[in-house]
Image (cartoon, rainbow, N blue to C red):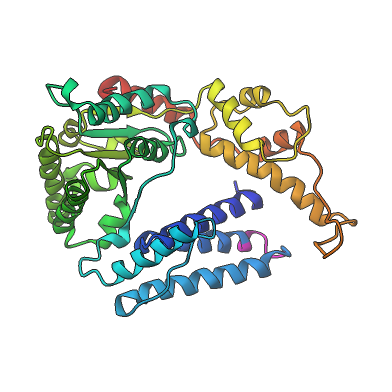
Amino acid sequence: MSMAPQELENSASKYAADAIKADSQGAIGMAITKYQDAFETLMKLMRLYPDSKLNKIYTERIQAYQNRIKALRSTRNGNIEPVLDPNASPEEQRKSLARTHANTQSDGNMEDLILKEKPNVKWIEVIGLDDAKNALRESIVYPSKRPDLFPLSWPRGMLLYGPPGTGKTMLAAATANELDGYFINVDAASMMSKWLGEAEKNVSKLFSMARGYCQRESKPVILFIDEVDSLLGDRNSEVGGEIRAKNQFLSEMDGVNGKGKEIMMYVIGATNKPWSLDSPFLRRFQKRIYVSLPSTEARENLFELYTSPLQKNARVSSSSLAKQFDGYSASDIKDVCQGAQLQVVNELFKSPSFSELVEGQEPSQPREITMADFRDIKQKRKPSVSPEMVRAYHKWSEQFGAL
């Protein structure tokens, strides 16, 4: 079944936003991947709806993304100004410029695949997931603040697993923020693809870089490896280079776990496919934390959060929506609210009385969002996680979970 046009446009917008963020922070490899995802999604949208009046706009966006990809790929041969995040402060934009210039001159090409930042994500922004929050607090936050209370040391490796869009990255970022530490975000899939043939050496470089930040600045460092299954999957079917890279990772993890209280460095892996990890890697992640779909209460809070800036009818009930959208992830719920807003905006643009923004004239406004709009969206927007997937996570948790 084809995706609805607003879903595809939502996806393309998200990819573009992620690309701009990565681009602004000098993470060139990640930015290229996200720009490609954005223009491929728009191409699909244009193929499915060739008569859409918006195709001219989509074509211009595609051209802009392709031009940026070409420019980024040329940075190995020269300097290029980064795209700046329009939501960033002037100081943050200045730092982005400095980071990108440093990265393009780096002989190791290491930092173009990571996002290194002090996260601005608070625990209160991570809705629900209380068990996961508590596990991360007791494993990372408490020992970092009072190491004297942990004579037997504490876990340094954590695995966050569960369906996509449930908040695994936000959990890790919020943990780093509470510690006032560094958050090094690595996309394992991009890392393995880019470093084909020299992954072993660069796994070592990655850990050395993380330890360096920790030691030089005396602050905790969280090394967050997304899609860790791309790096740590079943080793039985791999070629020699991949096996050596994974053996190097095991060795580095042993080093992190064996440092005692000397260094405040933690490794958090995230995966949607925990069953693809074999036992040697699971042993290095002492805490294995299931990040589940939101509960009814969490869904209600999520709808309250995402509908708060929208013009909605007084009868729109977050508690009622929470019951109707059982099985939807946090990311799904945000997409649903975006879809409802797009629906009323689309109506406005198509209405005969629509007037564009003109100086001195009051612009047209969309009508209020109603419960009927959410019912319409539910017919088009199904949950991204099936009941079969949820059962698979529960079964794996019964065997390997370690909260």
Residue stretch rendered in magenta on the structure = 46-51
Q: Where is residue 213 in the image (x, y as percent from the top left)?
A: 22, 50
Q: In which quarter of the image is the C terminus?
A: top left
- When asked about the image quadrant of residue 69, the answer is bottom left
- 331 sits left or right of 171 in the view: right
Residue drawn at the location 70% of the way across and 41% of the way down: 340
Q: x, y (%) of residue 113?
A: 31, 58
Query: Residue 104, located in which quarter of the rendered image?
Result: bottom left
Residue 314 in sight in this render: yes
Residue that sits furthest to the bottom in the current view? 77
Magenta span has 389?
A: no
The reply to whether residue 32 is visible in this rendering is no
Left or right: 359 as drawn, with respect to 302:
right
x and y, in percent, of residue 66 in the image: 49, 71
Q: Residue at x 62, y 66 (%)?
A: 58
Residue lying at the far right in this picture: please name it. 353
Please state which of residues 324 and 105 is positioned toward the viewer in this rendering: 105
Q: From the top left corner, tell me how far across and down residue 327 is, in percent.
A: 54, 28
Q: From what the image shows, is residue 77 above or below residue 109?
A: below
Residue 125 vs residue 247, the one in the foreground: 125
The image shows a total of numbered marks equal to: 0
Note whether 53 is above or below 153 in the view shown.
below
218 and 25: which one is in front?
A: 218
> In this picture, is 169 found above or below 39?
above
